[in-house]
Image: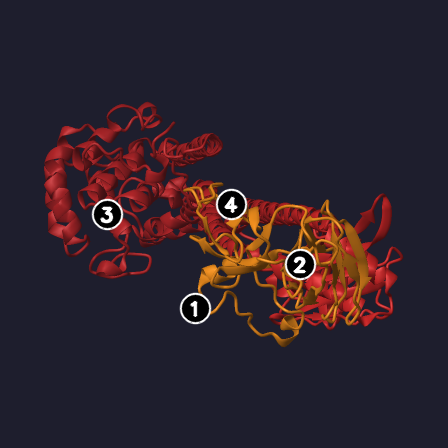
Amino acid sequence: MGLAAVGAADVEGTVVLQRRLTKRSVTAPASAYQRGATVALGADANDDPLALERSHVVVYLEGQLESKPVTATMEQKNRRFLPDTLVVPVGSAVSFPNLDPIFHNVFSLSKPKAFDLGNYPKDHTRTVTFSKPGIVFVHCRLHPNMGAAIMVSPNQWSARADAAGRFVLPDVPPGSYTIVDWHKAAGFFRQTVQVAESRGATVRFVIPLDEGGLVKAVAQG
Amino acid sequence: MRFATRTFLWSFIPFAVLLMGSFWAIQKLVESTVRDRLRSSLRETHASIARVRSKSELQNSRFLRVLGENAALKAGLQLALAERNSGEARLTVEEQLREICHTLGFDLLLVSDPEGAALAGVIRAGQQLTGLDTTRMRPPQRGLWTLEGRSYQVTSIPIDQADENIGILSLGEHFDFSEFTTPAVLSRHGKVLKSSIPGIPVQEVETALEDCRQQAECEVRLRAETYLSLPLESIYFGDGYLLRSLQSVDSASGPVQAILRNVFLLAGLGALLAASILSVLTSRSIVKPIARVVSHLRESEQTGLLPEFDTKVASTQEIRELSESFNRTAAAIREARRNLYRAYVEFVESLASALDARDGYTAGHSHRVSELSCAIAKAMHIGGEELEEIRIGALLHDIGKIGIADRVLQKPGVFTPEELALIQQHPTIGRRILEGVQLFQACLPIVELHHENWDGSGYPEGLCGEATPLGARIVHVADAYDAMTTDRPYRDGRSPEEAIRVLRQYAGKQFDPAIVSVFVSLAGIVGKFPLPVNTLEHTLEPAAGTIHKLVEAVGGNETPCLPQHLEATST
């Protein structure tokens, strides 16, 4: 971030999730059947169940700001996309290498970028460049239970929260922004953040749910 | 053959045959009914199995249709078609199939290209699903498919993509023979592949089933047992496979039939017993009256008597008529006999009368002696044939006098010794006269010996005491009495009292003292009855009037001097 604007400061934040939002599904690896081994379902007992949810929260700033495209990778391994949530700035290229011993057929029907990479076997890869911001859901035609989401952010300030729910948007020029928080199941949450010169801002997202288990679309400052 | 036996056989054998025949027919009928019932119950069972099967088949076809629309599978199939030689592509599809199999619990799942060549497949081995080596494998569209030593019932569905057929999905379920609770036989084009009939080898079943037309219900004989074979049409394998259920009708209906057989055997034996008893009773009811008639006839034959039948006892009309006709015949015979005897008696009497008529003085002598002799015999409790002999003998006792010249016989005064010898020949002459006549045989001793004396001084034999027959002794006493009491040309008759005195005097010498004493005891009665007078007119009708009254007085109300068998009741 050497090219950071003068007076830019980090926007730090925390995502607080009060409840699990998605069911975690485990797909047995292709070799599991042959081995006849039982597949362990669910995470370790020590794991914070919400940690996974938090790590699937994507945060970015709205607005046509400066973008710095990157090259990212989304692997297919054990019949899963790895990672299954990816944030890239607009214009980035994402490659989809197949690491499984079977074919995969990665495709997407999402508006920002619809593509079909066709069938390709192990150790082959295809690359897609995402030139429009938005959310792109990625699937495999051969394996309907494979799924991943790629958030193409409109600018370079975007991040995935970590397991603790913390995130940092570094070197944000001073100004007033709308910061957006997105979760696959919970949807979008917006907040306005004021970034003062050389002084960061701290944002706190609480993703509450109503009694029906739905996220209340209320952003708290 | 005895009449009773014949009657028994004629009534028993048709009865028994009829009875056994009807029992046999009933048993057959019941057996066939049981069989039919069993058959229809088997058919119903089959129908219900068929319903269940067709339902599950329908469900399977629905599953298949849903599976056929699986986009991922279609993509996989297309991949497999595109990458025929790629192991990875095959593995990809295998993965997909494995997942489906795992979820839906099929035993075999594979995809083929539109031409039917298998592309990839998985098969359940134990708990695991393993990939199939599909090289040159062509699964059947339908039917039974044997793979790796196991049979699978296969159903297939085409997979279409935009109206274009891109391949075939085949689903297989393990066909477990042992899950059929009924014995079944699996055959293909008449060749038996599997049989779950215990203890009977496959070849034998195949031979037995040869006659069975395909798809038809039929009965099969296997080891002396009848099996009902029904095709399980609901489980249609196609490709010449046919599953038949084989149910032993015998073992199913066996216990019922055993019970039936026992029941009918018992009933049959009981009925036979009843029939034989009835037959015995029938034959007896027919034979018994006849036997009675027969025994009656035999008795008549032996005794010479012709007694009456009691016609009231005879139960049946025919027997009654028979006995009545017998009675009529017997009566006619009795009448004829009586007439004959009467003629005989009349003849004897006329003979006696002829004798008496020679001499006016002896007129009625024979009849009187006969009456007196009868009276004495009655008093001595002599009856029946013996009395009749005495009567006839007494009537004819002097018949021998016919052979003596009137000059001697009617000579008044004392006889010369030559004359006496001539006179003393009359018993012998009498015997000789009567000897030739069968009817007079019994009277001969009386005629011959009525001049024998008690002390042996008589003639012609000079017999002593009881050596002389009783009849002759009686006639001797009566003859002497009558001779004494009748008038003679040369003297008047003595009075009865005097005659009795003389008799007494000579009792033990000339006469049997016992007879004399009997006669003496009768003397009172004898005196009261005027004996036939010695006139010719009277002696010609001796039977009439008072002649029997003396004997009646002595012997009670019994008609004297007639044989009893002639006095039997008349009809």
Which residue was labeled with disc 4? A191
Pair 4/3: label in front: 4
Residue displayed at 25% across by 48% down: B476
Which amino acid, by three-letter code, is at mark 3? Ile
Residue A58, visible in the rendered structure: yes
Pair 1/2: label in front: 1
- Left or right: A113, with B7 as reference point: right
Chain bearing tag 3 is B
Same-chain status of marks 1 and 2 = no
Which amino acid, by three-letter code, is at mark 2? Ile
Label 1 packing within 10 angstroms: few (<14), some (14-19), many (20+)? few
Same-chain status of marks 1 and 4 = yes
In front of the other: B250 or B550? B250
Same-chain status of marks 4 and 3 = no
Q: In what element is the residue under mark 4?
A: strand
- Left or right: B184, with A176 as reference point: right
Q: CA distance from mark 1 to mark 2?
A: 30 Å
Which residue was labeled with disc 2? B100
Chain bearing tag 4 is A
Which residue was labeled with disc 3? B474
Compared with B568, B190 (above or below) is below
Q: Are marks 1 and 3 in contact (CB under 8 Å)?
A: no
Q: In what element is the residue under mark 3?
A: helix
Q: CA distance from mark 2 to mark 3?
A: 146 Å
